[in-house]
Image: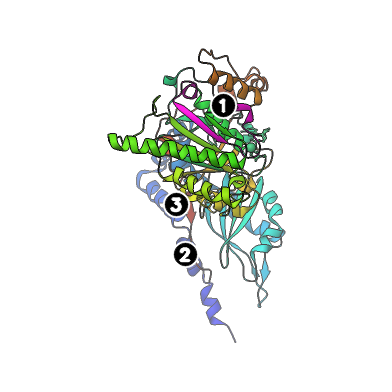
Amino acid sequence: MRDTRVDTERTPVRAAARFVARHPRSVGSAVVLDVAVLWVGYQTVLMAAGIAVVAGASWRLLDRPTFDRFAGRLLRAWWRRWWSYRRQWLRIMTACNLTTIDHKGNTLTPRVTWVKSTFAWDTVTVRMAKGQEPEDFEKVINRLANSFKTRAANVRQLKPGKVALDFQRREPFDDMFVPLPPLAESVEAVNLRRLVIGRDEYGRDFTVDLLGRDLHILLGGATGAGKGSFMWALLRALAPLIRDGLVRLWVIDPKGGMEFGIGEEMFHEFAESDKAGQKLIRKYTSVLDARKLELGRQGVRTFTPSLETPLELLICDELAAMTAYADKAIRAPFELDLSKALTQYRAVGGRTVGASQEPTKDVIPMRGLFPTKIALRLDSASYVDMCLGEGMRDMGAFADKIPEYLAGVAYVKKDGRREPLRVRAAYTTDDDITELVRFCTDRGATVTPIRREADDEHVGQTEEDIYSTDFEKLEVDDETDEVDETDYYEGDEDEEIA
Ligand SMILES: Nc1ncnc2c1ncn2[C@@H]1O[C@H](COP(=O)(O)OP(=O)(O)OP(=O)(O)O)[C@@H](O)[C@H]1O
Ligand SMILES: [Mg+2]
């Protein structure tokens, strides 16, 4: 007997209707184009298209991050979906053994339902064919990356029957040199709202705002990931204020002073052991408690660093040594004082930077209190959400995929900003640190030009040259840092395959 139901489902009309429903934007654009050609003639449409292309290209040239935000992602997601993924899909799925056979002998293929594209990564949402599990994709993930000609790939299960395949198309930091910013000569040259630490993936300055958004910063990263470079870059950006007593540094380096011992002279207080660290934070909180009372009495509500009330920056290099691995008599009061430091001193100038190799709950129970979180290379995928917050890996923060050779590369999550941003800190060598310490401890210091060795690698290359290959040198104002990196989605999420 004929199976009429199956025949009905496969009529061309139904197939066409399904196509329209699945690709409303693409079909809609084609229809609008056709109508326009009929209405005004193809010459006019061609002319309008030419003008749009020239305008778009100029925009991209002048301000790539905003172009990317409003148009680039949309165009790229659409282009990548049709040209890179749909076009080759059947061939690559078959070649990688990702098809299955049903009871009637029909070949079932996984379907692309959604493509999202960021500057460096594409995420392709796939409805698996019947009989498949995410592990089937995991097994051939390197073959998929190679077949689609991408650098790396990664599978995530989104919900039953659905996986996301993430493909890394490019590595901006391979070509991008992150220069160490010059030492500012005077306090006036430092803007506490825009302390330059490194560059982001677009080649813009990556800045920290110690007066507003980035009150406290948490750094998570495996050993050798480059946590030190973020902390030293911050100190370098603050140099004239440290020298003139407007910023005081309270540094806990419980690993025996391995990271910060070299800078001891420029610190207000320094602790090299867990016990000393606990005493240091106690003193820190008592100083700020007293200031809170005093300024509260005077009715002061906004903080401006001065000689009487300097910005008090608490730095703790390995939090685990003070929490998870410390004696209870040290751990308990330390955790209390740290939570206090993270919640009570916004208006009186208390700021905290903490680092840890394992951003787990045991190590940093108070990690939610850090408004800015930075994830460098991490040992496991589960650490990413622990460090940056729930769902951040799904948003594209693949900190566990940062290769070892890219030390100092990280994903940043700031409060009030949805998407993670990929950045790299400038690297402060031991010589640069020595120079910084000399500068901060000598009130009559003069600034000598720096970046000797690093600049040698780029002899004859101006900064313009370095970026002109892939990145435009960008003038950025305070706002652009806030760019909401919302990606563009092209897809038909709700379509179910018959
Ligand atoms: N921003 C950077 N750019 C380039 N290279 C870097 C950067 N940061 C670090 N490196 C390289 O990585 C090495 C390790 O960095 P660093 O000591 O800062 O790591 P860490 O995260 O502090 O590790 P640990 O937890 O073991 O202290 C450095 O010696 C340097 O060679
Ligand atoms: Mg370190």
Three-letter amino acid code of the residue under disc 3: Ala
**Is label 1 in contact with label 3 (beta carbons under 8 Å)?**
no
Element marked by disc 2: loop
- Where, by quadrant of the figure, is residue 452 drawn? top right
Q: Residue 109 or 32: which is nearer the viewer?
A: 109
Residue at image position (30%, 34%) is 300
Q: Residue 311 or 4: which is nearer the viewer?
A: 311
Residue at image position (65%, 44%) is 222
Q: How many marks?
A: 3
Three-letter amino acid code of the residue under disc 1: Ser
Q: Residue 320 or 436: which is nearer the viewer?
A: 320
Magenta stretch in the rendered image: 240-265
Ligand 1 placement by image quarter: top right
According to the picture, the residue beneath numbered tag 2 turns out to be 494
Three-letter amino acid code of the residue under disc 2: Asp
10 Å crowding of disc 2: few (<14), some (14-19), many (20+) = few
Q: In 3D space, how far apart are the residues under numbered discs 1 and 3 (Cα atoms)?
A: 36 Å
Horizontal side of residue 393 vs 35, given as left or right: right
Element marked by disc 3: helix
- Whichever of labels 1 and 3 marks the residue nearer the N terminus, that label is 3
Q: Can residue 215 be seen in this view?
A: no
- Whichever of labels 1 and 2 marks the residue nearer the N terminus, that label is 1
Residue at image position (57%, 14%) is 448
Horizontal side of residue 272 vs 27, given as left or right: right
Instruction: Name the mark on residue 468.
Output: 1
Q: Is mark 3 within 8 Å of ligand 1?
A: no
Q: Position of residue 3 (x, y in %)?
A: 57, 82
According to the picture, the residue beneath numbered tag 3 turns out to be 30
10 Å crowding of disc 3: few (<14), some (14-19), many (20+) = few
